[in-house]
Image (cartoon, grey):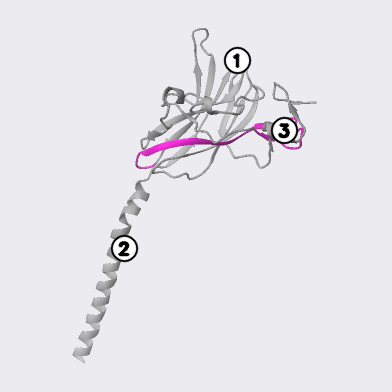
Amino acid sequence: MTSTHSATWTEILTALGTVSAVIVALVLAGAPAIKRWWSKPVLEATTGLEEPFVRPVSDEHTPIAEVRLRVGITNTGRSTARSVRAQLLDWWEHDSRRALGTDWVELDSDPLPLKWVSLRPGDDRPGVPPEVAILNGAADYLDVALLDSQNLKILFDDNRRALFRRDTSSRTGTWRLEFVVGGTNCRIERRHTVEFTADGPNYFTRAALSEPPSDSRHAGLISLLRHGLGMGQSGEPTD
């Protein structure tokens, strides 16, 4: 009896030792992944109507030659976000006339990199990708739109790469712009959309995070021609 009882406890202790060893091995194997997850950078987008989100730019003739609208990208994680890029996905213009039955017009675009405030423009640094490092607890900013006395247009890291019309059909109105941000150690978690309104005299009068329109019509030149519509210099459909 005693021998059998002792053998049973020996087997139990051996089994417990084996299970414990497996658990320790799994913890040690997963520790790097757990550490990366716990310390990873987290990028969040914000915007608004005060500096530095809205930045007036002067020239030698006037104190406000243009006004730039910005989106802030803040790293709320526990480590530096490295090689962070931002890329345009789509942009839309609100159509208050609802000429073709939809509220939003999808403007022509290409997946171009957006302009980081902390980097000189792409034409000043040819061949260098538009990448930034964002420290944990810090922020960088994207210049996304420019309003001057003539036009409202979206901005890219290198505006020369925009083979489509990047200015809008009017200086006044409402637009939405969708983009993504990600880096070597911070994957793209979601798409970001910012909605902004300009009325001309007061520059930007609204800027907030939003969602892509649920319904829109494409306004690329080829699409318009194929549907039998002409486009005047003002951007309005011609008769």
Q: Position of residue 224 (x, y in %)?
A: 72, 33
The kind of secondary structure element at disc 3 is: helix
- Residue 149 circle label: 1
Q: What amino acid is at disc 1?
A: Ser
Q: Position of residue 6 (x, y in %)?
A: 20, 85
Task: Looking at the image, tell me whether mark 2 or mark 1 is earlier in sequence order.
Answer: 2
Q: Which residues are magenta?
A: 77-106
Task: Looking at the image, tell me whether mark 1 or mark 3 is earlier in sequence order.
Answer: 1
User: In this figure, what is the number of numbered marks?
Assistant: 3
**Seen in the image, is 5 located left or right of residue 75?**
left
Q: Position of residue 178 (x, y in %)?
A: 56, 37
| CB under 8 Å between discs 2 and 1 | no
Q: Is residue 71 magenta?
A: no
Residue 194 found in image quarter: top right
**Seen in the image, is 92 located left or right of residue 41?**
right
Q: Which residue is mark 3?
A: 224
Q: Which residue is mark 2?
A: 26
Residue 185 found in image quarter: top left
Q: What amino acid is at disc 3?
A: Leu
Residue found 60% across the figure and 15% down from its top: 149
Q: Is residue 95 magenta?
A: yes
| Residue lying at the far top of the rendered structure | 61
What distance separates the C-alpha of mark 1 from that of mark 3? 28 Å
Confirm whether residue 66 shows in the render. Answer: yes
